[in-house]
């Protein structure tokens, strides 16, 4: 049986996959807003999921993580494309590379079915809150 923290983390991931109200992807997709608090919640959830052995993460977690990761990257690409017209308010321009590094650090092991890498604090330049 999954721990409470893992169940909560999986719920955050599922909410983002569905772009449910209050999720990071909802803010990106429906409100054209980079919601820092929602991003931190997703990042924290992914750290919890990545720390759990791959076999204990639950069915569909790899695919769910891959879809959320891809959706985030697509929103970033559309924002950066000058011909697209899509714009994200409060976009993290100066910290974009750190954001992308953090996404890779927390999502990659889950998508690849591997154990997480640990804290991204020293690697990404973004503070954990």
Image (tube, rainbow, N blue to C red):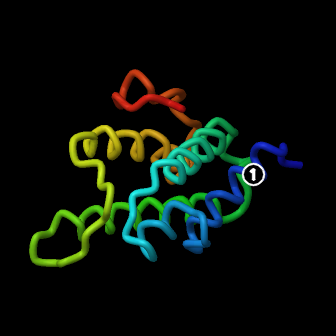
Left or right: 60 in relation to 93 = right
Q: Nearer the viewer, residue 101 or 63?
A: 101
In the image, is residue 112 above or below residue 126?
below
Q: Position of residue 8 (x, y in %)?
A: 75, 51
Q: Secondary structure at mark 1?
A: helix
Q: Quadrant of residue 54?
A: top right
Q: Position of residue 9 (x, y in %)?
A: 69, 50
Q: Nearer the viewer, residue 49 or 109?
A: 49
Give the farthest residue toward the top: 122
Crowdedness of circle 1 by 10 Å Cα count: few (<14), some, many (20+)?
some
Q: Nearer the viewer, residue 74 or 1?
A: 74
Name the residue located 41 percent from the left edge and 46 percent from the top edge: 103
The residue beneath circle 1 is: 8
Name the residue located 64 percent from the left edge and 35 percent from the top edge: 51
Name the residue located 65 percent from the left edge and 57 percent from the top edge: 12
Name the residue located 39 percent from the left edge and 45 percent from the top edge: 104
Q: Quadrant of residue 88?
A: bottom left
Q: Position of residue 31 (x, y in %)?
A: 43, 72
Left or right: 100 in relation to 49 = left
How many marks on residues?
A: 1
Q: Position of residue 38 (x, y in %)?
A: 54, 53
Q: Quadrant of residue 102?
A: top left
Give the farthest residue toward the left: 83
The quadrant in which the C terminus is found is top right
């Amino acid at each position: 049986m999954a721990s409470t923290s893992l169940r909560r983390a999986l719920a955050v991931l599922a909410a983002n996959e569905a772009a449910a109200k209050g999720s990071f992807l909802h803010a990106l997709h429906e409100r054209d807003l980079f919601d820092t608090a929602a991003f931190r919640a997703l990042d924290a959830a992914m750290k919890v999921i990545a720390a759990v052995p791959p076999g204990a993460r639950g069915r569909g977690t790899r695919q769910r993580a891959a879809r959320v990761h891809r959706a985030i990257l697509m929103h970033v690409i559309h924002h950066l494309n000058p011909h697209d017209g899509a714009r994200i308010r409060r976009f993290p321009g100066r910290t974009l590379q750190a954001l992308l590094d953090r996404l890779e650090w927390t999502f990659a092991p889950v998508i690849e079915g591997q154990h997480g890498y640990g804290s991204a604090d020293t690697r990404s330049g973004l503070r954990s809150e």
